[in-house]
Amino acid sequence: MGTSTPPVDYPEPDALADAFHVYEVEPDGDTVRYYGEPLVQKDGLVDRIAPLFREAGYHVSIRYETGEHVLVAEERSPGVDGVPWTNIGLFLATVATTLYAGSQWYDLSIESDPASILQAWPFTAAVLGVLAVHEFGHYLTSRYHDVQASLPYFIPIPNLLGTFGAVIRMKDHLPSRKALFDIGVAGPLAGLVVTVLVTAIGVSLPPVTVGPDAIVREVELGYPPLIHLIASFLGEPLTYADPSLMVNPVVIGGWVGAFVTFLNLLPVGQLDGAHVTRALVGERFERFQFVVPAGLFALAIGVFLFGDSRAVGIWLVWAVLALVFSRVGSATPIDRSDVGWQRKAVGLLTLVLGALCFTPVPIVFTG
């Protein structure tokens, strides 16, 4: 097969000659496919040629189809194309599930008065507020570094929180360790600011009265040091002697923010902690990310032996997830230059703040 000329602005086949031998170029709608043979290890091929495509405004990936290696170049589009109906739909669904969850924390009788569910809006605003700010911290920093990322996808689920969090998808090569660091650290830091604010508001609000049969009476939350510090600073309690009183559900938003921050800062896979740690230490990151699953398994054993055994399941689940995440791999930046001492200081501060969000028994069910 003869080599044809790719559309304007796409890299010429000759520009790839030291890494990928191209024997055919095939325009395919919004993409261009380069058929050929890798001349270097496949694991490092994309990293080697990505800067060439990125400069031209494209994202490149390698595939193996019907016995042939194919480089697929797609035009990069860092902005939002059209109306993000999926994001909007998931957000509205999560508003509904968090309103329902909040109705249980407020012990509202929505069976007899369905409209009363709207009274749970402070809970919804608190939970979605910390999650949204966290994810938009990533999104806006991605836009700043010209990295293609999606708007947040909220995950609705009919449980006592109403959601399983939110995520953004990055379909792009990270230009540098500095960009990787900034994108990774922006979410936790932005989310922590709102977590502190939400917690301060929540503990300052009056407690709620719940009946003896309320579902939330079967749940005990373990508050991390960050939440305790905020409550102590404001001179407000997190528990009450009167068993009919419970902390205002807005505080649960702060608890969610702290718990999400701790989990996201685990240095494994594609979590924020992995991005931050890899940006700080470079390739050395691969040597110790597998320690995380072992640490979580050890935590589960420690909680079982010396703490509240009802919390063992949480850490066993996250130990398995961390093991899976570690096999997926982490983001690899194109420019491996050092991030500098300023970012290292911010990274250390972020990890310390993440430690303040940890508690060995975050939640247990007593029923």
Image (cartoon, rainbow, N blue to C red):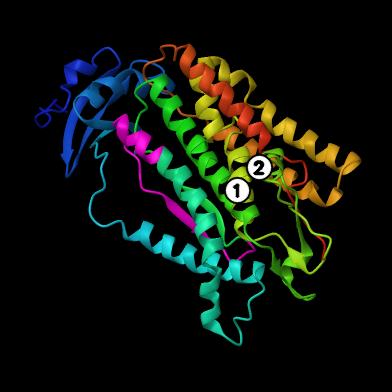
Q: Nearer the viewer, residue 56 or 124?
A: 124
Secondary structure under badge 2?
Answer: helix
**Mark 1 Cα-neighbour bin, 10 Å: few <14, some 14–19, many ≥20:** many
Numbered tag placed on residue 230 in the rendering: 2
In the image, residue 88 sits, relative to residue 71, either above or below, namely below
N-term-proximal mark, 1 vs 2? 1
Q: Nearer the viewer, residue 263 or 134?
A: 134
What residue is pinned by disc 1? 200
On the picture, is 10 further left or further right than 39? left
Highlighted range, magenta: 138-160
Q: Quadrant of the C terminus?
A: bottom right
**What x and y, as percent, mark residue 121?**
51, 66
Q: Nearer the viewer, residue 190 or 314?
A: 190
**What x and y, as percent, mark residue 55?**
21, 23
Residue occupying image coordinates x 52% and y 40%: 193
| Distance between mark 1 and mark 2 Cα atoms | 6 Å
**Mark 2 Cα-neighbour bin, 10 Å: few <14, some 14–19, many ≥20:** some
- Residue 250 lies within the magenta run: no
